[in-house]
Image (cartoon, rainbow, N blue to C red):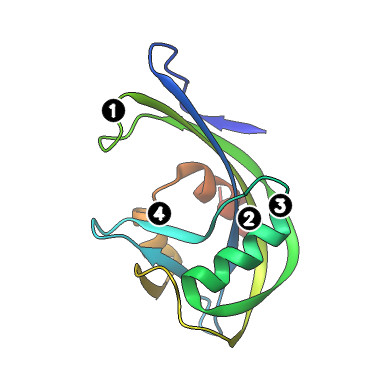
Amino acid sequence: MKTFGKRNYDLNYWKRTGAYAVIQNDQQQFLCVEDLDGNLFLVGGGIEIDESPEVALLRESIEETGHEIRIVEQIGKAERHWVSAKYPRDSQHNIGILYTCKLLEKIAEPVEKEKMRWVDFNYLEKHLFHEHHLYLLKQYLNIS
């Protein structure tokens, strides 16, 4: 598994494994969640106890977009260690499992209030928060 960053052993350790969707529309744009700082995230999130990555991704998609998705295939796994300005006492560790997915019908209103938007790859490359997600996406798209 490709690793980005290094764990800071002087800080509290916080590990989170998550499942994330690579969803494209007919214009080859990617569906993302945008936070208030303009950072982009792929649809998805943390895997709960006793939950498979696939079940977590289906749940997260409905929470974030209100849409069901169909998981097509797993792209891969990568991990990132970092310390965020928001949590400076925590050495964060995200293990991301990415899947290609198809967006299906809307079945509910999103629970989460972050803005959803479609972006082209060039914009995504500049604003995607997790570099390990970008690495996996580039592998999938055969971009070096």
Report, in whole angstroms, how far the alpha carbon at label 3 lies from the one at label 2: 31 Å
CA distance separating discs 3 and 4: 26 Å
The numbered dot on residue 128 is 4
What residue is shown at x 63% (from left), y 55% (from top)? 142
Labelled disc at residue 142: 2
User: The disc labelled 2 sits on which kind of residue?
Assistant: Asn
| Mark pair 2, 1: CA separation | 35 Å
Q: Secondary structure at mark 3?
A: loop
The disc, 3 or 4, on the residue closer to the chain's N-terminal end is 3
Q: Is residue 29 visible?
A: no
State the residue position of label 1: 88
Within 10 angstroms of label 2, few (less than 14), some, or many (20 or more) residues? Answer: few
What's under tag 1, amino acid-wise? Pro
Query: With respect to residue 95, does 133 lie above or below?
Result: below
Q: Residues within 10 Å of mark 1 (few under 14, many from 20)?
A: few
- Asked if residue 142 lies left or right of residue 72, the reply is left
Upstream in sequence: badge 4 or badge 2: 4
**Above or below 106: residue 124:** above
Q: Please name the residue that numbered disc 3 is placed on.
A: 51
The quadrant of the image that shows the N terminus is top right
Secondary element at tag 2: loop
Q: Which of the marked residues, 3 or 2, is nearer the chain's N terminus?
A: 3
**At 71% from the left edge and 52% from the top edge, which residue is drawn?**
51
Residue 124 point in image, percent of width and height: 41, 61
Secondary structure under badge 4?
Answer: loop
